[in-house]
Amino acid sequence: MSGVERVRESVSPELAQEIIRDRTEAGWRLVALEWERDREGGEQGHLEPVPYGLRVASDCRHLEADPEEFEVLTEVAQLVIQESRLPQISDALNSKGHRMRNGEKWTPSGVFELLPRLIDSSPRIFSTVDWPMRRRVTANRRTV
C-alpha cells in the first residue's frame, strides 16, 4: 500500500533554499510553509485546554458549563458508582452517541483521561437536581 510520507523540520532562513533544493532533488514536494513571529505587546493567549465539561462563554471572558459534556461526566459518574470497567463505560457512551472532543468514539483510555476531571466535577454533579433520581437508579442496578 503506497502512502504519503511527510516530514516537518525547523529550518533556518539562511539554509532554507539549500534544504528546499536538496529535498526536491530527493523527490520531495514542497506542500506548505509555516510562519511565526512574536506577538506585539507581549500579550499571551490562553495556553491551557478548556477543562472537559466547560466551554468558552460567548463573551470570551469566562468559562461556562457545556451541557453535552456535563451529561457525559454525569453518566461516567453513574457508571463508576456501578463499578463498571473502563471498556464498559466507553461502550455505554458510544452506544448513546456521545463522542470525544476530537469527534472520535470513546475508548477506555479516553475515559481514563477523563477521570481527573470527573473528580473535579463531582461536587457539581452530585448537587444537581436530578442526581438523587440517578443515584436511586444506580443503586437499583447494583442490587439486581
Image (spheres, rainbow, N blue to C red):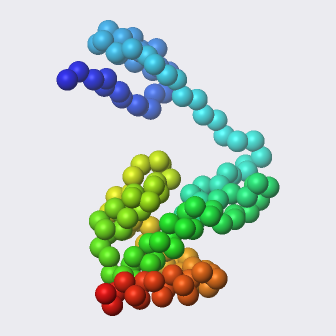
Which residue lies at the image location 50% right of the left edge and 66% below the top edge? 72
Pick the front one: 137 or 78: 137
For the C terminus, the quadrant is: bottom left
- The x and y percentages for residue 92 are 37, 64
In the image, residue 96 sits, relative to residue 15, either above or below, namely below
Which residue lies at the image location 69% right of the left edge and 63% below the top edge? 63
Which residue lies at the image location 37% right of the left edge and 83% below the top edge? 141
- The x and y percentages for residue 131 are 56, 83
For the N terminus, the quadrant is: top left
Residue 49's quadrant in the figure? Answer: bottom right
Residue 115's quadrant in the figure? Answer: bottom left
- Looking at the image, can residue 117 be seen? no
- The x and y percentages for residue 123 are 58, 84
In the image, residue 131 sits, relative to residue 18, either above or below, namely below
Q: Is residue 29 left or right of residue 120?
A: left
| Residue furthest front in the image | 144
- The x and y percentages for residue 17 are 46, 14
Q: Is residue 101 left or right of residue 144?
A: right
Total numbered circles:
0
Which residue lies at the image location 73% right of the left edge and 58% below the top edge? 57
Residue 62's quadrant in the figure? Answer: bottom right
Q: Is residue 85 left or right of residue 49?
A: left
